[in-house]
Amino acid sequence: MEYAVETFSLTKIFSDWWGRARVYAVDNLDLQVRYNEVFGLLGPNGSGKTTTIKMLLGLLHPTKGKSLILGGDGTDSQINSRIGFLPEESYLYRYLNARETLDFYGRLFGLPAKVRKMRIEALLDMVGLMAVANRPVGTFSKGMARRIGLAQALINDPDLLILDEPTTGLDPIGTRQIKDLILKLAERGKTILLCSHLLADVEDVCDRIAILYGGKIQIQGQVSDLLQQTNKRQITADAISDATIEKIKQLIHQENAECVVTSPMDKLETFFIRTVAAAQKQAQTTSGAVSTTKIGDFLTKQTVTEDILDKLVSAPVSQDGQAEPPATEKVIPVESSDPEPAEQLLSKLTGSTEQTEPDASVRSEQITTQPVESQAPGPEQVNKSILDQLTGKQSTQGQDKEPSDKSQAGDIGDA
């Protein structure tokens, strides 16, 4: 489990009709992709990138060698449910609209209806297709088809996201949006395997890259280490006078080195995005896809259940089994008629049932002062004890006596 993706001498040979080996698409590939990194798999056409991805996913059987993906076999259904895949070509049902397409893929993953509905709306908004959500995808442009393809790859909130040419056909705004999305998903902890011919995009988002040629890895490593020119130095300064520039040149010439002084330039992508953003601020209408910077909450945030349980598990517990508040905070008991959300959740987890609390006058009349023989605690009492420990409630003296009937037991527990 050290690597999210690992191959061992992975080889794929395509044979002719007579069974003779003709094409070595992938030749003894040893590849390692770490968890929580963006890895770029690069190479010219026919270098074996797409073939490698298909073998990882079990769509092609390797001639020899093996591969592991998320610690298991890519053909395993449990492993597949944790993978999101955007193929090089978006294969979509032409007569389904965008919502129906995402609902179809959500059903394949067995997502409940409420979860599907929430994720569909979030993903459509994220990829900028909310305005055309009811149009058949057969009428979409190639760039819009790539957007809905990316949304279907994220519908199951995957741990590993495999993207084969994700920015093909996208405009510069959409390309920038996809790159920002990849960076945000990496920050969340997802692993991303990216194949692309647009090297500027790979340079912006990838942590490590590997370059294939002839089905073999020619070189791999950190992007910054591979691209850095250690035999040169670069200095960026504010606007300075020509006299200062001449002094700098003289100092450099004394080191027997050459220098070129120029003004820095923006990337065309940055200039293009800035121009379009200015038009969007003027609320100019468009019939195409809309660029957004949003990302689905289910892709970036923990659920309420995880937040509550994390807080309860991290709370210190004293020797008597009671949860202790932080030393820097003062706990003041406050009466409330509504139970806390954490108590509701833990009541469901422990299986305890709540009873309606009677008035104070009724409670005082129902509570008996006669001693009762101690009995073994029942399941409801054990569950309430666990609930009290987790929520930090202090037991009151005299409540350890069990009443003689069930109604009195419920009343004493509520008191």
Image: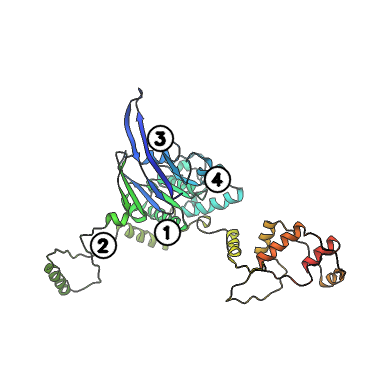
Query: Answer yes or no: do the residues labelled 4 and 1 have beta carbons within 8 Å?
Result: no
Which numbered disc, 3 or 2, marks the residue that appears first in the sequence? 3
Q: In the image, is 364 to the left or to the right of 178? A: right
Residue at the location (34% across, 37% down)?
A: 26
Disc 3: which residue = 62
Q: In the image, is 287 to the left or to the right of 355? A: left
SS state under label 2: loop
Residue at the location (34% across, 50% down)?
A: 209
Say which of 96 and 192 sits in front: 192
Callout 1, which amino acid?
Gln
Q: Which is closer to the viewer, label 2 or label 1?
A: 2
For label 4, the crowd category at 10 Å Cα-Cα, with few meaning under 14, some 14 to 19 and many 20 or more, is many
Which numbered disc, 4 or 1, marks the residue that appears first in the sequence? 4
Callout 4, which amino acid?
Gly
Q: Could you say which disc has been placed on residue 265 in the image?
A: 2
Tell me: residue 215, above or below residue 269: above
The image quadrant of residue 339 is bottom right
Disc 1: which residue = 284
SS state under label 3: loop
Which numbered disc, 2 or 1, marks the residue that appears first in the sequence? 2
Query: Answer yes or no: do the residues labelled 3 and 4 have beta carbons within 8 Å?
Result: no
